Image: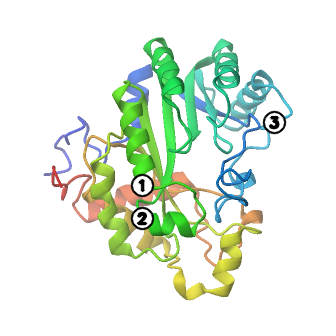
Amino acid sequence: MTREQTYPWGTARRYNSYTDWFTAHFGMRVQKVSINAGFTCPNRDGTLGYGGCTYCNNEAFIPAYCTPDSSVTEQIDRGIAFHRKRYRRADNYLAYFQAYTNTYAGIERLMSLYEEALRHPAVAGLVIGTRPDCVSSELLDYLAQLSVERFVTVEYGIETVSDVTLKRINRGHTLADAVRATGETSRRGIRTGVHLIFGLPGESRSQITASAEVISSMPVNVLKIRQLQLIRGTAMSHEFRDKPEEFDLYSLDDYIDLVISFIERLKPAIMIDRISGEAPPRMLDDPRNWSLRSNEILQLFTQRLEERATWQGRLYKPGL
């Protein structure tokens, strides 16, 4: 397959880009606006445990305009002002319920929050970040009704397909929970996304590469990947100082090659939204310094795909 040829997703790009699909779907520029609605997580409040995920500090990725003491509408207004100042203006926005577990409440409260966001005149739809063990049939039925007329995506933080790792990082759910949740969400016609972290302690590169087969077997529309980043003050940052030999902190080149080895085995229909994450440098407790933004890493990834003459799904084997 040459560069000029079209790949299974209908473009000449060597991976199935969610950005390309998004632009075609809306016919205009759409930007996510993050919301912190004051949720917690079951592995924080004692339901499943305390302390949360060992790698997690929400301050590392939640914008400053997101404060749970402000209403959803106020956060959307501030987010739009922030994006218009920092980036070029978008035509519409998606309300991104991002902080902690955004389905971890009673159905009445969830409906109130989501519908407040949808009443905002600039909001075209919802993106809801959550855990696979925190969605009920009642909630999914409600979201399915919403998705008939509005854009709705549910993104599940799976992080890894290894139950051993999930336990080690105090995640509090299993792979079976993820399989069930994505299946129940997709069955109702709701767009379904998953998040993965590459570089969690104890996981080899071959394990991560092989996990593409598991993800490909799930009814996933959109995938987000990010590298493990050690955030100051987290339990994982302390664990790294105590047992650095159990971590594989990739160089940037190694990480890009790992992502490519993964997506070569990934189902072509799964759209890729992100291949790396960013945290404020002041919050990092990480010996690496890639000194690149996510869009710059994506450019290197695209170049490496061409250099290696490969593409998403090249080694994908249906039915495995």
Q: Secondary structure at mark 2?
A: loop
Q: Residue at x 57, y 39 (%)?
A: 129
Query: Do the residues bearing badges 1 and 2 touch, measured as CB atoms within 8 Å?
Result: yes
Which is nearer the eye, 138 or 3? 138
Tell me residue 215's x, y (percent). Answer: 33, 52
Hey, what amino acid is under mark 3? Pro
Q: Secondary structure at mark 3?
A: loop
Q: Secondary structure at mark 1?
A: helix
Tell me residue 250's x, y (percent). Answer: 49, 75
Q: Which residue is mark 3?
A: 68
Mark 1 nearby-residue class (10 Å; few <14, some 14–19, many ≥20) = some
Mark 3 nearby-residue class (10 Å; few <14, some 14–19, many ≥20) = some
- In front: mark 3 or mark 1? 1
Hey, what amino acid is under mark 1? Leu
Q: Which residue is mark 1?
A: 175
The alpha-carbon separation of the residues under discs 1 and 2 comes to 7 Å
Left or right, 29 with respect to 205, comes to right
Above-or-below relation of 243 to 153: below
Q: Quadrant of the C terminus?
A: bottom left
